[in-house]
Amino acid sequence: MKVLLVEDDDALAEALAEALHEAGVLVEQADCGGEADFLVRTEAYDAVILDLGLPDGDGSRWLAEWREDAIELPVLVLTARTRWADKAAGFSAGADDYVTKPFETAEVLFRLRALVRRSHGHAHPVLRIGELAFDTHTGSVTLAGRPVSLTAQESRLLAYLAHAAPRVVSRSELAEHVYDRDHEPDSNVIDVQISRLRRKLGAARIETRRGQGYRLIGDAEAS
């Protein structure tokens, strides 16, 4: 999962970004609405964490503009404003969820994962593709009930494929959503990590569509 954190409080932004990173989330940061607007329109993210009190205008204004331009990625509003009128303004602008400062990082992470999961059409927190199960809350993976140990990068790669399944995911899409934009890999790096996942999950469980990309498949198709 790759998210954009829009927050002008440097100490808060760094602390939240570090906590999210430790939980396996890739975080890119912006400290004003203008920068956030540019990144949202030019980069690929799975969600945005948006503060309302930004130095160059209310965050809800930027959010409303994104929604008017059919930018539909999930947005979690994060603000110190506690009045219902402020919350209502955020939801009216197009927010998907709302967390009030001060907050527990675990709650932000929980809500963020739920937003991303629902944006892919999944209601249950555990994504199942045949005997493979990926718990979106904990990041744990099991195959036929047995735990599978993955590196952080392997886990992010599998998470994106699991959220997208059974859709085919291109290499470029994986590069945009699974890797930091300053360290986007070439196709060989992705191929190597796909091969490592196959060794742990079974070679047939990740299908290669020549010229298209990869997709996770169920047990019937893999057999």
Image (cartoon, grey):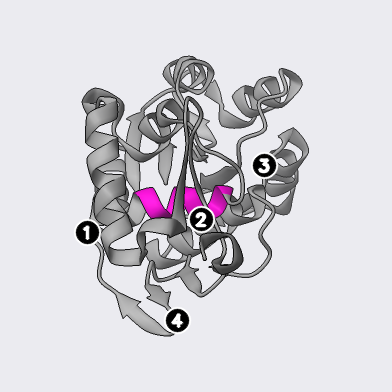
List the residue tagged with mark 4: 144
Which of label 3 and label 1 is nearer to you?
Answer: 1
Q: Mark 1 points at which residue?
A: 151
Image depth: mark 2 or mark 4 in front: 4
Residue 2: x and y in percent read 40, 41
Task: Check whether the beta carbons of the residues at disc 3 and disc 4 lie within 8 A of each other.
Answer: no
For marks 2 and 1 on the same chain, the one whose residue lies earlier in the sequence: 1
Q: What residue type is labelled 2?
A: Ala
Q: Which label's residue is closer to the chain start, 3 or 1?
A: 3
In magenta, the rendered stretch is: 157-164
Question: Mark 1 vs mark 4: which is more N-terminal?
Answer: 4
Q: Earlier in the sequence, mark 3 or mark 2?
A: 3
Tell me if mark 2 has few (under 14), some (14-19) or many (20+) residues whose alpha carbon lies within 10 angstroms of its own: many
Residue at image point 58% right, 51% down: 165
Residue situated in front as seen by the camera: 223 or 201:
223
How far apart are labels 3 and 2 at the CA level?
A: 25 Å
Report which residue position mark 3 lands on. 95
Judge depth for marks 3 and 2 and give the one in front: 2
Residue drawn at x 45%, y 59% as measured from the top left: 205
Marks 2 and 1, Cα distance to the nearest angstrom?
Answer: 16 Å
Q: Camera-side residue: 210 or 19?
A: 210
Structural crowding at the residue carrying mark 4, measured as other residues with C-alpha within 10 Å and reported as few (<14), some (14–19) or many (≥20)? few
Judged from the image, the secondary structure of the residue bearing numbered disc 4 is loop
Foreground of the two, 196 or 102: 196
How far separated are the C-alphas under marks 3 and 1?
A: 33 Å
* Helix, strand or loop under label 2: helix
Question: Of label 3 and label 4, which has the lower sequence position?
Answer: 3
Q: Is mark 1 on a helix, strand or loop?
A: loop
